[in-house]
Image (tube, grey):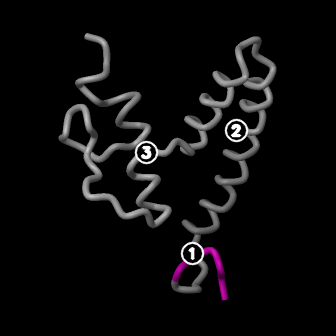
Amino acid sequence: MWLENSNGQYSVRSAYNVMREDVVEEIQDEVFEELWKLKVPSKVATFAWRLLKDRLPTKVNLRRRKLELDDFLCPFCRSREESAVHLFFHCDKILPV
């Protein structure tokens, strides 16, 4: 039984994804090591780390943790779900013109 696939069957795609995750984790570890070496306030480094790891308490992440909310839309534009990617890279109401 192949545990990396939901149906228990081996596939080349699932094996590729397992190998890719290992490489991505190694690269992220190096990036985070450099992040902690930066001469910035610790709260800035912590925020950057949480942003890069998608650990900010956005509505999408709160839903993932089974918190019940009435609304998952971005409070600024009200057009997409509130996620870190949306807030920091796509929201028209936040991005500079």
Judging by the rendered image, the residue that carries numbered circle 3 is 58
Which region is colored magenta?
A: 1-6
Q: Residue pushed farthest bottom?
A: 1
Residue at 43 percent across and 63 percent down: it is 67
Q: Earlier in the sequence, mark 2 or mark 3?
A: 2
Asked where in the image residue 94 lies, by quadrant, the reply is top left
Q: Nearer the viewer, residue 87 or 33?
A: 87
Numbered badge on residue 31: none
Judging by the rendered image, the residue that carries numbered circle 1 is 11
Q: Nearer the viewer, mark 2 or mark 1?
A: 2
Q: Nearer the viewer, residue 12 or 40?
A: 40
Q: Nearer the viewer, mark 3 or mark 1?
A: 3
Residue at 74 percent across and 32 percent down: it is 32
Three-letter amino acid code at the position of disc 1: Ser
Q: Nearer the viewer, residue 10 or 7?
A: 7
Judging by the rendered image, the residue that carries numbered circle 2 is 28
